[in-house]
């Protein structure tokens, strides 16, 4: 018996040796062990919390008093508990944002929690979070802004020493760090120790990134580094949660400068890139990164979050979802509930892999240890592979009877490099093959959505591969229906239109601020409300007896009487037509540039709203610094507000500015510069905020 055991052990060992000898050679850059472990996390959290949380700003200017920081109910265990229940694997905390305020008692600055009233200056947010992450089995990541609007020496060589000293504190005092995150925003207006000026740095040379990265490798060798263009993780090119369907984990890191991104190459990657640099999709649970009470009703819905999941993890990336912390130190219940509901839905969608019951076959195989059955055996260490000379192949999964499917999950054996550049998927329906998808890259994970079909077989066609293709996993699923919230729009005449993406669903709405039910108004046609109103609407499937998420839009006064008095251009009224897809735009007009509007009657104004160009790429005319004026006669103007739309280039959403109430009939928005520096001036939508008379 003992001899037989030895014999079979030898046979197995020889088979494994032969397998290794016959394995495909790595192709191109391959992931490090740290990158592999990191990408397997798939979903993890961002925490935005700083001094600007207490000033209701997106970016602090660096001159705010440390005494403002006083989160009386701060509970990092609540943050960790929410993230754990949401299925996330780690948390990255904004240890220092652009304002320079430090959430730990840094020995190198007085601008930190040690000079705040919170815990009488004896608190340490990073320490409390590190302990909470350990308790809930989450990994800890650190965000340290390279830009510091508080430091007097920002822009001087001495600041780099300060920056590295703080980085050393964070990477040596709180245990293992899984990701180090640097922001791409560098240089601009700031307090700078009281100078109150605009400072610019050479982003390619000032930070001496090679030596800073070497320091991280020394202190936290298992951490991956996000510095917009690499070296381990790159930005996806937007902050809306949209990964690209074509997404290479290849990128030539040395060819790009942090803070000066090529958004298109960041989005798609580079098929001939020399480095393995994975795309990370960072997006907030609500429009802003920091907490604003006005956005409590704007937390992303389940359908929206599902879209982001499929466009991030499902497009060969990872997903970094932000929670803005309230001034009391907690995650808002709306953000927590949305994230947990998403996790429940994902568990429901992917609880049963229908591919496990299929018979797999392939047009070509490398050998018995790389045959088609290795692609649906639920084992991440096995994979199907084609012979070295083959770059086109088919893998077919067949069933004994038709099954209902609407999702397919594909994975390359990414340890050997990303290879596949074009593929398609067919389903065998009612005796015929039907094409259900035409795609490009796969990478670590690709998930496709399609209409539910009853398939007897599914065929993956690898049409182009840069080396012999590998497939580690093919999964098939049937996701339950999820209703999408309706879109609510109002034109300048006050006509409100509600549209549902599901033509079969009924839509119910309210105009009194209450949540709609099946007893509310049934939407059948557009209706007119010219005054201030809150409209809420939901889709309802009368067959499934199922309702979708509630959409909410707050409208101010109707704009039918508005007239643009300057500039006199053909498209000038597009800025208040109620359609964010249309734009008023002046190309190359120079700065300052402005538009002035006659509101038709005198109103009690307490703010304005500005929506920039909503194009995905090459957005133009986005106002960066602004001045806003009011007037009773259109000739004599008074300044009501001035400032900067923080982070508007990367997060081009509605900007709401409030100011002391003033009576006015005319308003003027002046753009002092634009985010691209192209001397353009534009506006997708403009509105005013009115108060009581």
Image (cartoon, grey):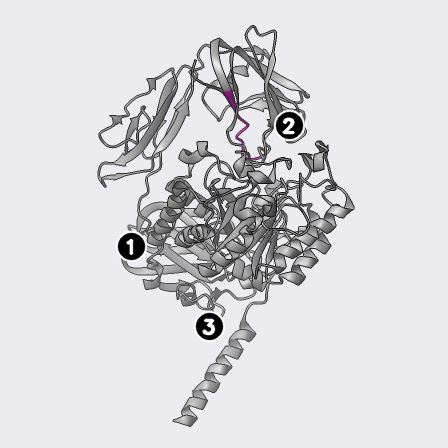
Label 2 to label 3, Cα distance in Å? 58 Å
Q: Nearer the viewer, residue 368 or 534?
A: 534
Q: Which label was assigned to residue 403?
A: 1
Q: Which residue is mark 3?
A: 369
Q: Which-is-in-front pick, marks 2 and 1?
A: 2
Label 1 to label 3, Cα distance in Å? 28 Å
- The reply to whether residue 205 is visible in this rendering is no
Q: Which tag, 2 or 3, sits closer to the chain's start?
A: 3
User: Helix, strand, or loop for circle 3?
Assistant: helix
User: Helix, strand, or loop for circle 2?
Assistant: loop
- The reply to whether residue 338 is visible in this rendering is yes
Q: Residue at x 49, y 79 (%)?
A: 15
Figure quadrant of the C terminus: top left
Picture coordinates of residue 395, whole percent (x, y): 42, 60
Q: Mark 1 packing: few (<14 Cα in 10 Å), some, or many (20+)?
A: some
Q: Residue at x 57, y 64 (%)?
A: 33
7 relative to 534, above or below: below
Q: Mark 2 packing: few (<14 Cα in 10 Å), some, or many (20+)?
A: many
Q: Can residue 613 be found in the magenta stretch?
A: yes
Picture coordinates of residue 21, whole percent (x, y): 56, 75
Figure quadrant of the N terminus: bottom left
Name the residue furthest front: 120
Q: Can residue 364 be found in the magenta stretch?
A: no
Image: magenta residue range: 607-617
Picture coordinates of residue 162, whole percent (x, y): 71, 49
Q: Nearer the viewer, residue 178 or 683?
A: 178
Q: Which residue is mark 2?
A: 674
Label 2 to label 1, Cα distance in Å? 54 Å
């Amino acid at each position: 018996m003992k001899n037989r055991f030895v014999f079979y052990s030898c046979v197995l060992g020889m088979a494994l040796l032969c397998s290794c000898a016959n394995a495909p050679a790595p192709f191109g850059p391959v992931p490090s062990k740290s990158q592999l472990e990191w990408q397997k996390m798939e979903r993890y959290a961002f925490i935005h919390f700083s001094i600007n949380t207490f000033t209701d700003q997106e970016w602090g200017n660096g001159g705010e008093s440390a005494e403002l920081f006083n989160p009386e109910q701060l509970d990092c265990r609540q943050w960790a508990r929410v993230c754990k229940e949401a299925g996330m694997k780690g948390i990255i905390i904004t240890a220092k944002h652009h304002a320079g305020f430090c959430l730990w008692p840094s020995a190198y600055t007085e601008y930190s929690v040690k000079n705040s009233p919170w815990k009488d200056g004896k608190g340490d947010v990073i320490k409390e979070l590190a302990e909470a992450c350990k308790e809930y089995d989450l990994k800890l990541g650190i965000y340290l802004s390279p830009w510091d609007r508080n430091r007097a020496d920002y822009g001087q060589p001495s600041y780099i020493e300060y920056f590295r000293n703080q980085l050393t504190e964070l990477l040596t005092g709180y245990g293992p760090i899984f990701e180090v995150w640097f922001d791409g925003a560098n240089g601009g207006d700031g307090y700078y120790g009281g100078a109150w000026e605009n400072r610019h740095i050479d982003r390619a040379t000032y930070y001496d990134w090679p030596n800073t990265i070497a320091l991280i490798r020394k202190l936290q060798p298992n951490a991956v580094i996000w510095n917009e263009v690499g070296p381990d993780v790159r930005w996806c090119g937007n902050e809306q949660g949209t990964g690209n369907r074509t997404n290479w984990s290849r990128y030539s890191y040395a060819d790009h400068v942090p803070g000066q991104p090529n958004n298109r190459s960041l989005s798609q990657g580079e098929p001939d890139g020399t480095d393995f640099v994975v795309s990370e999709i960072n997006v907030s649970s609500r429009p802003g990164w920091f907490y604003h009470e006005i956005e409590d009703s704007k937390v992303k819905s389940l359908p929206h979050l599902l879209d982001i999941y499929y466009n991030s993890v499902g497009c060969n990336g990872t997903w970094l979802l932000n929670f803005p912390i309230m001034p009391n130190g907690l995650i808002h219940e709306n953000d927590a509930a949305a994230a947990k509901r998403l996790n429940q839905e994902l568990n429901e969608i992917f609880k049963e892999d229908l591919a496990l019951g299929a018979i797999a076959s392939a047009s070509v195989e490398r050998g018995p240890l790389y045959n088609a059955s290795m692609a649906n055996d639920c084992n991440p260490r096995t994979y199907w592979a084609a012979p070295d000379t083959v770059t086109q192949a088919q893998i077919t999964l067949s069933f004994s009877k038709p099954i209902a499917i609407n999702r397919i999950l594909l994975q390359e054996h990414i340890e050997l490099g990303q290879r596949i550049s074009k593929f398609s998927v067919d389903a065998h329906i009612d005796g015929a093959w039907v094409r259900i998808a035409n795609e490009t890259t796969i990478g670590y994970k690709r998930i496709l959505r399609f209409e539910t079909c009853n398939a007897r077989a599914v065929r993956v066609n690898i049409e182009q591969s840069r080396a012999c293709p590998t497939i580690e996993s093919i999964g098939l699923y049937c996701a339950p229906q999820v209703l999408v919230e309706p879109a609510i729009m109002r034109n300048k005449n006050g006509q409100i239109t509600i549209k549902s993406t599901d033509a079969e669903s009924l839509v119910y709405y309210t105009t009194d601020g209450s949540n709609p039910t099946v007893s509310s108004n049934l939407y059948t046609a557009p209706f007119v409300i010219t005054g201030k109103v809150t409209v809420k609407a939901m889709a309802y499937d009368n067959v499934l007896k199922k309702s979708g998420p509630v959409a909410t839009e707050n409208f101010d006064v109707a704009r039918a009487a508005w007239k643009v008095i300057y500039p006199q251009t053909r498209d000038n009224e597009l800025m208040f037509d109620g359609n964010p897809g249309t734009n008023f735009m002046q190309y190359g007009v120079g700065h300052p540039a402005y538009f002035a509007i006659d509101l038709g009657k005198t109103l009690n104004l307490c703010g304005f709203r500005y929506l920039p160009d909503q194009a995905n790429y090459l957005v133009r005319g986005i106002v960066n610094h602004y001045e806003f004026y009011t007037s009773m006669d259109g000739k004599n103007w008074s300044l009501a507000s001035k400032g900067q739309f923080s982070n508007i280039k990367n997060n081009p959403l509605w900007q709401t500015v409030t100011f002391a109430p003033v009576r006015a009939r005319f308003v003027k928005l002046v753009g002092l510069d634009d985010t691209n520096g192209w001397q353009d001036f534009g506006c997708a939508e403009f509105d005013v905020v009115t108060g009581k008379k």
